[in-house]
Image (spheres, rainbow, N blue to C red):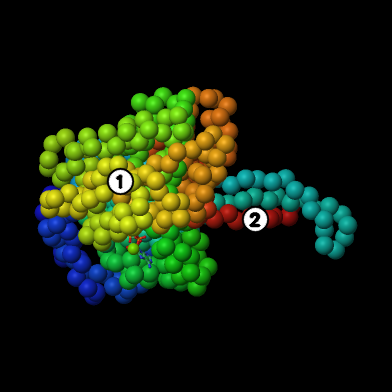
Amino acid sequence: MTMQNVLNELRDRPGTGEVIPIINPATEEQIAEFKDCGPEAVNEAVARAKQAFEAGVWAGLPARERAKIMWRIADLIDEHADELARIDSLNTGMPLVQATLGLSNCAEFFRYHAGWCTKINGNAFDIKTAGIASDAWVDMHTYTRKEPYSVVGLIFPWNGPIFNACAKLAPALAAGCSMVVKPAEETPLSALLLMRLITQAGVPEGVVNLLTGYGHTAGAAITAHPDVEKVAFTGSTEIGKEIVHAAAGNLKKVALELGGKSPVLIYDDADLRKAIVTAAMGIFVHSGQGCVCGSRIFAQRGVYEQVVEGIAAVANKMKLGSPDEDGCASGPLISAKQLTRVLGYIDEGKSGGVEIITGGYRLDRKGYFVHPTVLTNVDPGMRLYQEEIFGPVVTITPFDDDEAIAMANDTTYGLAAAAWTNDLSRAHRLGKRLHAGTVSINCQLVFDHAVPFGGYKQSGWGYEHGHEGIASYLKTKSVWAQI
Ligand code: NAI
Ligand code: MG
């Protein structure tokens, strides 16, 4: 399927709502447009998914057959990795090498979860219970069954379109769910090709239903739908809260992977060279548009100056550009909306007296490029210090040893935290005391399909990946049989 086929397919998708343009963020040119599918399409898609679930065309297959089909999806993703990477890098502006690197993780989502298909089991209990009519003990054979949610709604953002799609589709398929799937309105392209591959691999009709539209239309309709049993969402904390409200109608289960304002602590005794380069990439990669980006760096007083200089030096060396320019370390922000938002935070800093060590401006060229920005002398009360910016903007604050953990934890978010130190005891103390779903010690941006990922505080509900990830698509039923 060539790029042109994907663009044509999107253009031809039926819809009843507004026309939504897709803009290449590196050039600001329109590359496609499509019609918002509208709420009626959501009703139809949910009905198809429900029918497929009730017919047992997927959940009713032998687990090993589901697993084989999931392996086939992984192989097809590998075969089409080039096209998928090209589509995502055109659509998001991220460098092609980065998009390509991400693709092996996408295929692995299906392989890892294919393994789970044959390992979804309940427990058996040997129980004696008190009889109702007499005081004699009654023998019971009691067991749990793990059953898939029938129809799940999968809603995800634009920052890693194909990665986000696979992270949700793979466990939902392994569990046996049927689903409606809504990519971000900015980046629906790679999901179209993924749908083709899923069908080609042998997932039966009606199990996976793609919806293309806005969040406030299609997304909201999915979240409010009485036949959707569960919604799994990745995106902003603001919309996460709206989803919780909308889900109240049928008390659907909700899993949320939300924003972050992740702290990075650099201690005097750290391997400074490694810490500086990694911490800089940990915020500037993908122009800061990652949920786990370390947007608040704290440096112990003895190394503070070196850290500020070092991070600024990396920022100044990073070449920004569009996917077709060679040697770029990062691309543009996704949209004019995000550009305005990010520059708004920077302006707040400028008028509030923060020191701009480097950056702080949009590049003088087409595309939504913002120079990697390093800010110091930031008042902790400022919005830019409290809220997720989702851009290449980092604050650096000095600390004394006894105040570091409290400073790091002083946020409403709790997605990730990192610490750089060669003191073994301190490292493990931090592993325990930092309030975040993921704590990285002497590393950042680490990921594996087997390791659970989720947010503390307002960074989310529930976990993705690993055992917890697959468990979140399964219900537990207890069956009691008197013997
Ligand atoms: P968003 O949270 O509005 O969008 C994410 C997804 O949710 C998209 O598919 C969107 O169509 C959908 N959506 C929007 N409103 C919805 C609703 N009412 N019901 C159901 N689905 C809905 O994120 P947006 O507006 O693109 O970005 C704004 C900010 O959100 C960013 O600056 C960043 O701080 C944060 N964000 C965080 C992400 C993360 O990975 N943690 C990813 C994307 C954005
Ligand atoms: Mg939004």
Ligand 1 shows up in the quarter that is bottom left
Residue type at mark 2: give it.
Val
Q: What element carries label 2?
A: strand
Q: Residue shown at 28%/73% (left/top)?
A: 38
Locate residue 213: give its quadrant.
bottom left
Residue type at mark 1: give it.
Ile
Q: As drawn, is 450 to the left or to the right of 424? A: left
Locate residue 16: give its quadrant.
bottom left
Q: Residue shown at 51%/44% (left/top)?
A: 407
> Whole-percent x and y of residue 187?
24, 56
- Seen in the picture, residue 424 relative to 91 is either above or below; the reply is above
Q: Residue shown at 15%/45% (left/top)?
A: 322
Q: How crowded is mark 1: few (under 14 residues within 10 Å), some or many (20 or more)?
A: some
Q: Is residue 260 visible?
A: no
- Residue at the disc numbered 2: 479
Which residue in the rendered view is the most extreme toward the front? 353
Comes first in the chain, label 1 or label 2:
1
Which residue in the rendered view is the most extreme toward the right? 135
Q: Is mark 1 on a helix, strand or loop?
A: strand
Nearer the observer, 260 or 271 = 271
Q: Residue shown at 74%/51% (left/top)?
A: 140
Nearer the observer, 152 or 204 = 152
Q: Is mark 2 within 8 Å of ligand 1?
A: no
> Whole-percent x and y of residue 145?
58, 52
> Whole-percent x and y of residue 121?
55, 45
Q: As drawn, is 413 to the left or to the right of 199? A: right
Q: Is residue 401 visible?
A: yes
Locate residue 475: give its quadrant.
bottom right
- Seen in the picture, residue 247 relative to 410 is either above or below; the reply is below
- Residue at the disc numbered 1: 356
